[in-house]
Image: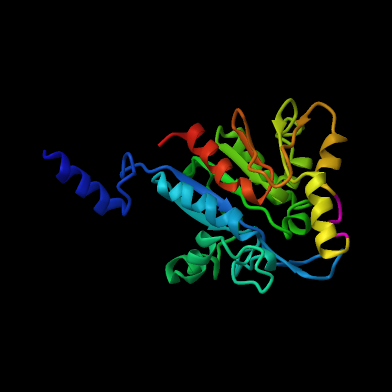
Amino acid sequence: MDVNDGRRHAASMSGNANVTDPRAPRRVLMIVANPATSPTTGWPVGFWWSELTHPYWAFVEAGYEVEIRSPAGGALQGDAYSDPEHDSGYSADDLLSRGFKHSPRHAALLEDTASIADVDVARYDAVFLVGGQSPMVTFTEDARLHALVARFYEAGKVTALVCHATCVLLRARGSDGERLVAGKTWTGFADSEEQVADAVVGQKLQPFWIEQEARALEGTNFVVGPAFREHAVRDGRLVTGQQQNSGAAAARLVIEAVGR
């Protein structure tokens, strides 16, 4: 068989010439927070755009199939400051998110997401939880989400969480009752970053700070890098990213662990 014919055939089956085996592509489930209202500010909160779009791009470029779901299902909404078209201009240079928003096919992925109720863990190679303001409200005490994350981890799947989505690791436990982060090195949104965020808006944003809570846990190693610098950590099957600038780095660690 001609090599070029084979490549054309693979691309036609998958839509991506980087897929190693179109008959068995790698699959990742991205879980994105549903819209909510912050109990501290009263503002509407959601997911952080770059923490969705940058990892999504990394996975697709590696030939992965990506499915996006949310705990409750339905339409999703990004945090205002993460929107590249927000008046603040805070994320104006985020071209990946801008492109995702204006691509009808991609924007449709967020308009009516399936819930996590019927997730078949065996179908995926990895799970990736997207951060933002909403996870601090909707992920922290969601026992069903915690159980699903534990199921992925205990099934031998790579389990990744970024930024404020790492609040799940403050509560999630395995079937043996042990915390998923027991004996693990991991990261999440840093106190130094919370201080900056609070100063920018002039008030307290989060109901608690992840680093403070994590450092109060025994038997785990929480680490952070410089504020708002790319920083992601892989400890076995557990991958964590510090903040919004670390999503793609976390995705690359997932790809490194899963393979292509």
Q: Is residue 253 left or right of residue 187?
A: left
For this orientation, the residue located farthest to the left is: 1
Q: Residue at x 42, y 46 (%)?
A: 64
Q: Residue at x 56, y 60 (%)?
A: 94
The N terminus lies in quadrant: top left
Q: Residue at x 85, y 41 (%)?
A: 213
Residue 92: percent from the left, percent from the top? Answer: 59, 65
Mark count = 0
Residue in front for this viewpoint, 132 or 23: 132
Residue 201: percent from the left, percent from the top? Answer: 82, 64
Q: Quadrant of residue 136?
A: bottom right
Q: Relative to 114, is 167 above or below? A: above
Q: Is residue 119 visible?
A: no
Q: Quadrant of residue 138?
A: bottom right
Q: Is residue 32 visible?
A: yes
Q: Is residue 135 left or right of residue 258?
A: right
Q: Relative to 167, is 87 above or below? A: below
The range drawn in magenta is: 204-208
Residue in front for this viewpoint, 27 or 120: 27
For this orientation, the residue located farthest to the bottom is: 87
Q: Residue at x 62, y 45 (%)?
A: 246
Q: Relative to 98, is 7 above or below? A: above
Residue 66: percent from the left, percent from the top? Answer: 47, 52
Residue in front for this viewpoint, 129 or 120: 129
Q: Is residue 218 left or right of residue 129?
A: right
| Magenta span main SS | loop
